[in-house]
């Protein structure tokens, strides 16, 4: 008996304690009391006869869903270092405007300047050598010989006058009577006669002069190529803006040492902005180039045209990147958050209804839209996810149910309630 009692009593006690715990957790939670400031506001609302608030109705789910995106420049240029060195010049800081073709940053070129001067000196030397080789070649071809002709000046003058006429007569005879020509196998039908000075010219010397002239020309081309190479290396030490814009971000400061590939600055035209979103595959069929899509940026609603749809899905989410061109003059800045309303298939039908409340019943806690639901016990704050606006009503995608009542123009002050629900 004692053993049986020892077994039953603990079980009985455990059952009693379990029942007490179950009753404790099963009872409805006690709601904290309304703060004095909001209690006074609720009493004033009761006195005005509007304590019941306005009913949460339903409206079509406006054939669109909300996607988040961000503003980015349409023309963005990333300038990076093409050679190692030290930053010797920087155009400005973030926000400064630069013109197309303007020098933005430059590396020191102290090590290249001596090579550049030496290359120009080599080019000048090769130019002088080419001119001298050309003169020597022309002298060997057409210049007078230093040795005198046999027979003296009289014989030399006679040869200069008579030899051309003799060659002319030989050519005439070769055409009239080819068999009578002195050299029938010659292409001209005759063998031209040379003067003594022509016969004294050394053709190996002429060929050597021509080869020297050609070598000098080749050296001249090589010197110019070395200068072009140095020009390219000097150009790589300068970062030039390809188009006008402003400096969005500067990664280096004066005196910094950079390596090839290291970013220097980002330049963009802030007057031409796009909104970049990642659209699910289900919504891509609802988007076409040139479509006007409603967007909200900086609390302003505008229409933006679809400017680009990427051809493939990227990232683990398997979404497609879409860019929308903001119209000129929109008060937006690079990096701002934007909301884009994309059409959804089948939206707006009778089965696609969502709760809707008056727009003036929505207040904001920081960046979160909230509404105050009127219950028999007081006011309860709900965080909302908003949809489209139609007239004076706004669709609520989550946070409310149809048939509930919300306070119109809530008198609660910002920060009066810190809890997620304001007590009943």
Image (tube, rainbow, N blue to C red):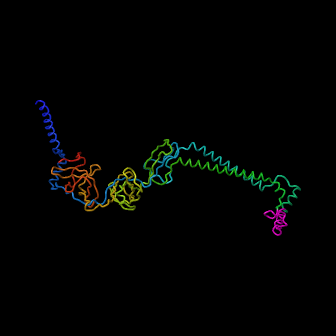
Q: 274 or 62: nearer the eye?
A: 62
In the visual, does 286 lie left or right of 96? Answer: left
Q: Residue at x 14, y 53 (%)?
A: 47
Q: Position of residue 352 (x, y in %)?
A: 26, 59
Q: Position of residue 133 (x, y in %)?
A: 72, 51
Rendered location of residue 413, percent (x, y): 23, 49
Reply yes or no: does residue 186 show up in magenta. Answer: yes
Residue 199 is situated, as x and y percent measured from the top left of the image, at 82, 56
Magenta segment boundaries in residue numbering: 163-190
Using the image, determine if residue 343 lies above or below residue 7: below
Q: Quadrant of the N terminus?
A: top left
Image quarter of residue 51: bottom left
Q: Residue furthest left?
A: 1
Q: Would you say 134 lies left or right of 170 here?
A: left
Residue 215 shown left or right of residue 37 in the figure: right
Left or right: where does residue 142 sit relative to residue 126? right
The front one of 66 and 389 is 66
């Amino acid at each position: 008996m004692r053993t049986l009692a020892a077994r039953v009593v603990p079980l009985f006690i455990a059952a009693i304690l379990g029942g007490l715990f179950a009753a404790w957790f099963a009872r409805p939670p006690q709601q904290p009391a309304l703060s004095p400031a909001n209690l006074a506001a609720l009493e004033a609302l009761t006195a005005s006869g509007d304590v019941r608030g306005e009913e949460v109705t339903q409206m079509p789910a406006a054939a669109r869903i909300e996607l988040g995106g961000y503003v980015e420049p349409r023309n963005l240029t990333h300038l990076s270092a093409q050679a190692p060195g030290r930053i010797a010049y920087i155009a400005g800081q973030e926000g400064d405007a630069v013109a197309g073709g303007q020098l933005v940053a430059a590396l020191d070129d102290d090590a290249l300047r001596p090579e550049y001067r030496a290359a120009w000196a080599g080019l000048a030397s090769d130019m002088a050598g080419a001119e001298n080789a050309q003169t020597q070649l022309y002298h060997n071809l057409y210049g007078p010989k230093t040795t005198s002709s046999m027979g003296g000046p009289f014989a030399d003058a006679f040869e200069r006058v008579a030899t051309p006429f003799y060659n002319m007569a030989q050519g005439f005879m070769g055409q009239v009577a080819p068999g009578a020509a002195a050299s029938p196998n010659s292409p001209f039908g005759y063998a031209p006669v040379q003067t003594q000075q022509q016969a004294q010219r050394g053709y190996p010397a002429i060929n050597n002069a021509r080869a020297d002239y050609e070598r000098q020309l080749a050296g001249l081309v090589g010197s110019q190529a070395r200068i072009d190479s140095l020009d390219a290396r000097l150009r790589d030490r300068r970062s030039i803006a390809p188009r006008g814009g402003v400096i969005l971000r500067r990664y280096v400061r004066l005196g910094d040492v950079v390596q090839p590939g290291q970013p220097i600055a980002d330049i963009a035209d802030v007057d031409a902005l796009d909104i970049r979103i990642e659209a699910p595959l289900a919504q891509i069929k609802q988007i076409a180039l040139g479509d006007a899509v409603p967007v909200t940026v900086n609390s302003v609603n505008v229409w933006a045209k679809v400017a680009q749809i990427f051809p493939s899905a990227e990232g683990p989410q398997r979404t497609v990147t879409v860019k929308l061109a903001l119209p000129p003059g929109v008060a937006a800045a690079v990096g701002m958050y934007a909301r884009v309303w994309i059409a959804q298939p089948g939206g707006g039908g009778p089965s696609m209804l969502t709760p809707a409340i008056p727009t003036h019943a929505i207040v904001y806690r920081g960046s979160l839209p909230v509404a105050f639901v009127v219950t028999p016990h007081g006011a309860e704050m709900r965080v909302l996810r908003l949809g489209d606006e139609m007239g004076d009503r706004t669709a609520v995608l989550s946070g409310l149910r149809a048939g509930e009542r919300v306070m119109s123009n809530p008198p609660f002050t910002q920060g009066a309630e810190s809890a997620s629900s304001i007590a009943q």
